Structure formats: structure tokens, C-alpha cells
Image (cartoon, rainbow, N blue to C red):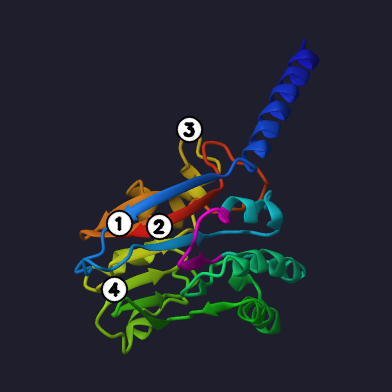
């Protein structure tokens, strides 16, 4: 009888894990629209492709599949919000994904910030990751900003470094930022709780994977900051009246499974 229960449990567990692994291939494509204050009536909408948490050690989407998913509509700007990988042997794998994004030819470029897993790499290995991003067309931002002009207005892309590893420096990132629309890119969204008196119009982030195993609740995320206790682990939220978005990410950490969550590709339309 005991053997029967063990075998039955093993079969059920195996089935659950099989389904959970298949979920990592079922990418959700979301489109989010947010308003842009003081937009000129003649100004066009700005479309941003947002990818986060690729985790190349555990990703079920290959570069060709990614290209098919994102190549059907024009993109103005691409935002990559960290956690590309955490092992040096994965760095060469990143180039193929970046080349796919470069083929999309976004008018205003590709911008990237780093996450906690990226900072597992040290010294020359981290520098190799950064160089790989840059030689493949990405502008990396570590507590710094870059201003582009859209319809005669400033679009300030502000990269705040990863909060959970204590690399973030909001003051430094904003140093010298001109008047305009402030788009913040960061990995860990918890930093938003320290930005109540800091002007931003929209913030993009990742980090939580939507729980990855979000069943019945993502209890394992509790240690990952106050936003989890506020039940903000994915999607569009507001803090102090300002919008911020938490992507569920494209890859996985630990075991390559998802329960109650899906890999995500996000289009943000600023209009």
C-alpha cells in the first residue's frame, strides 16, 4: 500500500513538473498604455519593447522564437531591465538574443540596466557582460541617464542600478537631468518606495518573475522587499500617483518551471 501511494505521488508530481516546464514556453505578450503629460497634440505615441530577467541559464525561448514574437510591429525604443545571466559561460549566448533585438532597429536605441544576478559576476567577468551588451548595440546605464529628443521634447532615460545589491544611487542617476519626460529603468522595483519625492513619469522593472511559482501565493518572495507585502509583484501599479511596471520576466531561476505565472514580453505605449 505504501509503495502504491509513493508511485501515485511520483506520477502526479512528475505530471505537475512537466506542465510547469511547458509553461515556460507559453510567453504572454502584454500591451500597456500610459499617458504622457504635456504631450504636444502633434506628437506621436512612443512604443517601448520591455524585456526583463532573461536568465539565460534557464530560458525556454530561443533567439529565433523571440524574433518571431517581437518583429511584427515597429518599436521606438527597447528597455532591458536586468538579470541577463549569472555565469560567465552564459555570456556568449547573450549575443544571439541581442542581435535579434538590434535587427528590430528601434529608432531611439536599446537601453539596459543590471540586476542582482548580473552582479554575481565579478571583475573582468562582469566587465565582459557589460562589453557584450555594448558591442551589440546597447547603452548600459549604471546610476546615469541619457537624453534623447522626441518631437522637440526631452525624453530622459534614467538608469538606476540594482537596489537589492545596494548598487542603486538615485541622486547620482538624476544628476543633471534636464526638464522633460523621465522614464526610469531599474531591476528591483522596491527602489520606487524611496522615490516619493523624486520626479519620474514611468518606471520599468522586473525582479519578481511574477512569483514564478505563484501558487497558492508567492510566499517565497516575502524576503524580497516591501512591495511583495503590499501585493505588488507583477503588472502596472502606482505609488504616490506615479505609474511603475513590474515584468514577469522572460526566463526563470533555480528550476526551469512556472506555476501561476508566464514568461512575459511587454509593449508600453506612452501616449
Q: Crowding at label 4, few (<14), some or many (≥20) Cα neighbours within 10 Å? A: many
Real-space Cα separation, disc 1 to disc 4, in angstroms = 12 Å
Vertical placement of residue 14 versus 21, above or below: above
Q: Nearer the viewer, mark 3 or mark 1?
A: 1
User: Range of the magenta residues?
Assistant: 70-82
Q: Where is residue 267 shown, x and y percent of the image?
A: 45, 55
Specify which label sits upstream in the sequence, 3 or 1. Answer: 1
Mark 3 vs mark 2, foreground winner is 2
Residue labelled with disc 4: 181
Quadrant of the rendered image containing residue 121: bottom right
Q: Secondary structure at mark 1?
A: strand
Q: Is residue 182 above or below residue 247?
A: below
- Pick whichever of labels 1 and 2 is earlier in the sequence: 1
Identify residue for label 3: 216
Residue 157 at x, y percent in the picture = 39, 76
Residue at (61% x, 70% y) in the render: 102
Q: CA distance from mark 3 to mark 2?
A: 29 Å
Q: Earlier in the sequence, mark 4 or mark 2?
A: 4
In the image, taking residue 125 as reference, residue 201 lies left or right, namely: left
Secondary structure under tag 2 reads strand
On whether residue 249 falls in the magenta region, the answer is no
Locate residue 23 relative to residue 111 in the image: left or right. right
How far across and how far down the image is residue 200, in percent? 28, 70
Amino acid at each position: 500500500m505504501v509503495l502504491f501511494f509513493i508511485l501515485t505521488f511520483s506520477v502526479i508530481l512528475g505530471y505537475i513538473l512537466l506542465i510547469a516546464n511547458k509553461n515556460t514556453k507559453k510567453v504572454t505578450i502584454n500591451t500597456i498604455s500610459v499617458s504622457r503629460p504635456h504631450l504636444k497634440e502633434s506628437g506621436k505615441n512612443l512604443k517601448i519593447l520591455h524585456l526583463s530577467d532573461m536568465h539565460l541559464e534557464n530560458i525556454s525561448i530561443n533567439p529565433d522564437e523571440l524574433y518571431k514574437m517581437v518583429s511584427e510591429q515597429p518599436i521606438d525604443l527597447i528597455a532591458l531591465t536586468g538579470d541577463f545571466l549569472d555565469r560567465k559561460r552564459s555570456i556568449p549566448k547573450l549575443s544571439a538574443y541581442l542581435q535579434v533585438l538590434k535587427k528590430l532597429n528601434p529608432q531611439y536605441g536599446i537601453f539596459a540596466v543590471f540586476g542582482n544576478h548580473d552582479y554575481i559576476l565579478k571583475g573582468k567577468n562582469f566587465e565582459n557582460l557589460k562589453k557584450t551588451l555594448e558591442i551589440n548595440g546597447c547603452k548600459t546605464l549604471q546610476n546615469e541617464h541619457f537624453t534623447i529628443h522626441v518631437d522637440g521634447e526631452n525624453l530622459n532615460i534614467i538608469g538606476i542600478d540594482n537596489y537589492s545589491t545596494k548598487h542603486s544611487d538615485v541622486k547620482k542617476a538624476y544628476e543633471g537631468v534636464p526638464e522633460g519626460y523621465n522614464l526610469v529603468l531599474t531591476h528591483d522595483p522596491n527602489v520606487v518606495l524611496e522615490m516619493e519625492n523624486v520626479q519620474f513619469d514611468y518606471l520599468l522593472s522586473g525582479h519578481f518573475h511574477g512569483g514564478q511559482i505563484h501558487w497558492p501565493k508567492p510566499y517565497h518572495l516575502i524576503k524580497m522587499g516591501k512591495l511583495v507585502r503590499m501585493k505588488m509583484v507583477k503588472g502596472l501599479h502606482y505609488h504616490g500617483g506615479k505609474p511603475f511596471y513590474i515584468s514577469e520576466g522572460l526566463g526563470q531561476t533555480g528550476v526551469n518551471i512556472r506555476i501561476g505565472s508566464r514568461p512575459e514580453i511587454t509593449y508600453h505605449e506612452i501616449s
